[in-house]
Image: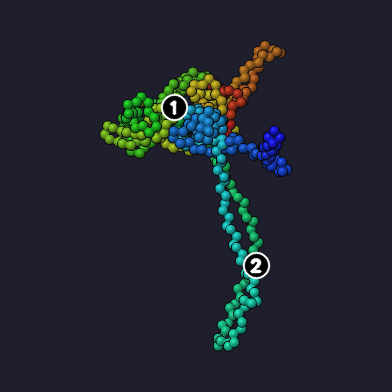
Amino acid sequence: MGKAMRMAGALFAALTLTLVGPEAEGQQVPAPETPARPEAAAGVYVVRPGDNLWTLSGQFLHNPFFWPRIWERNKFVLNPNRIYPGDPLLIPGLAPAPPEAVALPAAPAVVVPAPVSPSAVPPEPIAAAPAVPAAPPAPAAPVAAPETPEAAPSVIAPPPAVIPVVTRGQAICLGFIHEGGPLGVGNILRPLRDSFTIGPHDTVFLTLRSGTSVQVGEVLQVVRQETPVTHPRAGGVLGRLVRGRGLLQVTEVQDQSIRAKVIYGCEDMTAGDTLLRFQETEIPALGTAIPTTLSADGMIVHTDMSRVSVGEFHVVYIDLGLKAGIVPGDVFSVYRETGLAADPRAWGGIRLSPTLRGELVVVRVTEWTATARVLRSDLDLRIGDRVRLAAKMP
């Protein structure tokens, strides 16, 4: 019995030393480092064909259900279901690329001769060699004054990226108000495969309007004409809303057969969609417009997707265009009429000053109208709100 008790005590002591570990010897165990949250850093990822927020969230955040975190970081994305190849997305957890440093030339190494031991000096020769006439000494080179060392240049970070009003993909897909007359050079006749909808990389046949032609390699924009737009105050029809659907590139031109391939898609296309000649346009950058005293007052006449109210980064249409001197990049302030207030001192009312609601930037212009994005909205914006030119492109 005593032997068993001694064995149990020894076993308990061994377990105690094992569990206590370094603390028993007075050593401090360093506290585990707290891992940085993935949201602490963010880098830029360029969207590729086939990407969506769900798959990108699974790839970078390791959980596809975290896709709203990416959407919150990229306010320019109007619809989380629609991101376009080439769009730069800020991804939480994706480490930003370090700034490119300027390579500085390395300082030359200084060679210090080793001391020579006296024993290593060779002895004097017994017989001297025949004397050779010595050449006249060369003139001594002037000793240049030591130059003051220049301060090493500091590391130069790349300049901040220019933020465009819209991305290239959004510029292709934005709508505009067509004010009448023939639109485009032709239409999609039908897809090559037996399908109602047309998507990326599909091949389609085209039909052209009389008197028009296309060439192999030419890029065409696909648009769809939608609802007529009526002026909320005047009541007349301003035109028909046209929305971008994507881009085609002509691959074959024969007598009566023209083929093209979808190279960029905003939304599904169908037979009958209209074709425009596509031209790359320069997209203005935010912050380049300067305040102006020029007068240009108008109104929000339509909203994208026919929304009742809109906010930041939504798209609206105003009744000012090229005829009023408006160009892409111009900035407008948005006001709403406050109405009348009863005057307690007399019969009648007092008209109150308009209330500032937000700010717009123009991204596309036609003759009489313009497409704009909401830069800022203190309150919701609606059709009928007044707009006033605040800053003009130089």
Q: CA distance from mark 1 to mark 2?
A: 73 Å
The quarter of the picture where residue 109 lies is bottom right
Considering only order in the chain, which callout, 2 or 1, is on the residue closer to the N terminus? Answer: 2
Secondary structure of the residue carrying tag 2 is loop
Q: Secondary structure at mark 1?
A: strand
Q: Residue at x 53, y 20 (%)?
A: 308
Are there few (<14), some (14-19), or many (20+) residues within 10 Å of tag 1? many
| Relative image position of residue 253 (x, y in whole percent) | 30, 36
Who is closer to the viewer here, 98 or 267? 98
366 or 222, which lies in front? 222
| Residue furthest out toward the top | 347
Q: Residue at x 69, y 38 (%)?
A: 10
Give the quarter of the figure containing the N terminus: top right
243 horizontally vs 119: left or right: left
What numbered label is drawn on residue 113?
A: none
Q: Amino acid at mark 2?
A: Ala
The mark closer to the camera, 1 or 2, is 2
Q: Is residue 378 visible?
A: yes
**Three-letter amino acid code at disc 1?**
Arg
Q: Residue at x 57, y 46 (%)?
A: 99
Q: Residue at x 64, y 18 (%)?
A: 351
Residue, disc 1: 243
Against 53, is 126 above or below?
below
Image check: 340 left or right of 162? right
Locate residue 120 relative to residue 211 in the image: left or right.
right
Q: Which residue is mark 2?
A: 145
Residue 380 position within the rendered picture, expressed as x and y whole percent measured from the top left:
58, 23
What is the quadrant of the C terminus in the image? Answer: top right
Residue 372 appears in the rendering: no
